[in-house]
Amino acid sequence: MKGHVWRPLYVVIGIVVLLLLFRFFYVPDDFGIQKQGYTFGFHRLSNEQEWKDFPAKYKGTEYCNECHDDKVASISASQHEMIPCEDCHGPARNHPEDPEKLVVNRSRELCIRCHSKLYMPSSGRSDIPGIDPGTHNTGMECAECHNPHNPSLEDM
Amino acid sequence: MKRRDFLKSTAVFVAGASVSLSALELVDPKEVLASRPELRWGFLVDTHKCVGCGMCVKACKLENDIPYDANVTRTWVERYAMMKNGEVIKDSPKGARDGFTSKLVDQGEAGTRLLRDKDIAQAFFVPKLCNHCTLPACVQVCPVGATYKTADGVVLVDRKWCIGCGYCIMGCPYGVRFFHPVVHTADKCTFCYHRISKGGNTACAQACPFGARTIGNLRDPNDPVAKAVLNERVGILRAEYGTKPNVYYIGLNKEVH
Amino acid sequence: MVEQVAHMMVHGEAWTVKELFVLPNEYVYWSIQIVLYPYMTGLVAGAFVLSSLYHVFGVEKLKEIARFALVFSFALLPVAMMPLLLHLQQPFRGIHVMMTPHFTSAISAFGIVFMTYACIVGSEIWFVYRQFIVESINRLEKKERRGIENMLLPIYKVVSLGARDLSPEALKADHKAVKFLAGLGIPVACFLHGYAGFIFGSVKANALWMTPLMPVIFIMSAVVSGIALCILCYAIFMGLRRWALPRGKTHFLPDHWAGATELTPEGLHSMQDYETKMTSKYLLIFMTLAITLELLDIIFRGYTAVRSWDIVREVIYQRDFFKIFVLQYGFGNALPFIMLLLPGLTTRRACVACVLVLFGVLMMRWNVVIGGQAFSLTFDGFMEYHLPIIPYDMETFKEGLGGALLVAVTPFVIFYFINMIFPAFITDDKAH
């Protein structure tokens, strides 16, 4: 074989070397096969921490209770005791600093998520008192008659 | 499980069983986590308890910065209505972000359809989310190692490395993946990794007023989820794909898959 | 992030119409570009296989068209990558496929197989044209260069890699190398395209795609479309050149215009009858294989009738009936099949048949890629794909008619410029 035959091969080897060199600088050091093996665990390790550092918005009823224990106590004594504060008041985020005030959702749309009467046998929905939102005091907000922290009309 | 680990977890179990139930609730979750030698996150959905309010979907979107009005979601709730004539009707309008408030069933281009009470034999809701499979098909097909499974069993996506080819979206048998409309990479449920790894609860489970959703450690014999998976009749979705899901369902029906 | 008022389009929403029960995150995520991707790779692989018929199996009569097919395959090569890049949500991260390949994924093979294949085709062309290049250097160095020839000479010098030996032994070595590379190229070309089929065939979540036949079907239809495109383009380009030269329209003759070749009207012949007949024969063989496999796939699905068959049947026999049985099998397979079989085949009839074959293979890619996403994972709903015609943002351009046309036009632009350096139509014995 004549020597010139190998020249394209040298070019190819050159390209491969350049690619590997680029790879060496480009791929993060912590990228590799982690505990789960190559099939399921081939990744950049620091991404796990990045996900752990994702900021939480919902803080939970215990967090609300630190300042608003009276409100938590009132709803806890009612039929709505199972509803977490943030379902209606919105995620606390960094309240009271940011946002300073939480906007409470008083819309009918919120209430009828549970209280629109649907025939759902074999589901917990059937156990919830419900109304037909198309006919039940249309145009009014539910909170005008029902106190969300004590919804039963008899108790009012 | 190693012998030592078994002894350890048995010790935790015995210790837990010896104190009263109410006292157990006061244990700091972080301390409990630290004492657990092995951790494998699992999820339990009780379909009997779900009322289709969709608060979980709303909380998930707000918690995880999924644009609220974009028609994609990390978790959703499906409505199933089995009619007396044998017909099965299903829908999940906007993933149930605004809950189920109407008897009209969303059929996409085919319009809506009224569910008449007297025709219904049984009807219920089924929440869906990423199954964080033991053998995730989505991870297997990722060409660049941008999605992966953590040691504690959560499937995550590296937003800085994903090329957005969509192969994982195609590979997932459950349709839980989508392209994030702002980040422009594949996106999916993380089991709220930022919350559970700090001892918290997932946003969806926390927002659920009825306890239909619970997350727990499948390796901890004292964990409510692990106990339910062990002792109750639970099912998984689409077992035929061999992905070994880690989301368990109480009250599955043959129409649900 | 507070509740946003403006509706935010998610990827796929612009062209997907849902019907009945479809999961909230389901859209036609893989659209026109992914239809074109296996189509273009298929053309590359098919053109290369055609050129190898001469180089490896010594089918002497195909010498001229084989050289054309090789250069054309090289021009198509970068375009096989284009649809993938246009479809990526993060196109600038495309290099990650080469940086951190995850080999449990069919796509990760792309970077390596594609590069290997490009190297093989590139080297083969280098060996085929080395004699021509060295002679051109000698010619250009002696004569007074005009305009573009000043640019051509340094390009030739770089391309020659300094190997200017034209001794008989050296040329013999070139010849041997071409044969070796063409032989090596066939399995790599099949692999390149077979794994494109594997990308689809291995998706267990997709009831229509998942079949081990997929890679084989893809290879067969690839060869079919590649040969058809070569026949068609070869005939058209030859006609064009014969028309352009006497009229002095040299910009239609890039090789002549750039000074790479000196053309005379006598040196230009039209496509020979035996070339048409010969290539058509190979086309028929591969078409038969492709159709057999595709029908086997449908029959098998109907016979085994697993759970997904209900919805797959509705897609195949009802919703996509026109696209599959009329456009793909009727106009794309049966009609050209008869046209090629009828006695007295002329080049013109062969060309019409090739247009139909190319259309048929495109429809096959469409029916697989789009058809596979035409039904929901729940098997309870359908999704319809509407190709964006008039783009209103980057996404609807990339994944719409505009992007598709861009991909379709690019190989011809590349081929035009490549002809200035590697003239695909030289007729004398300057090259192998």
Image (tube, rainbow, N blue to C red):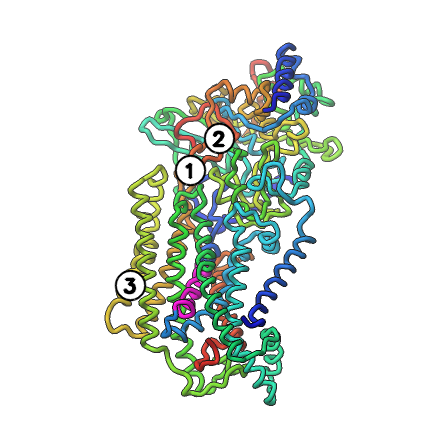
Label 2: state its secondary structure: loop
User: What residue range appears in magenta?
Assistant: C39-57
- For label 1, the residue is C378
Label 1: state its secondary structure: loop
For mark 1, name the chain. Answer: C
In this view, the mark in front (1 or 2)? 1
Q: Out of B41 and B58, give the one closest to the viewer.
A: B41
Left-right relation of C417 to A60: left
| Res C122 label | none
Marks 3 and 2 in Cβ contact (< 8 Å): no
Ranked by sequence position, the earlier of labels 3 and 1 is 3
- For label 3, the residue is C337
User: Residue placed at 50% from the left, 36% from the top?
Assistant: B95
For the residue marked with disc 3, what is the amino acid? Phe
Q: CA distance from mark 3 to mark 2?
A: 58 Å
In this view, the mark in front (3 or 2)? 3
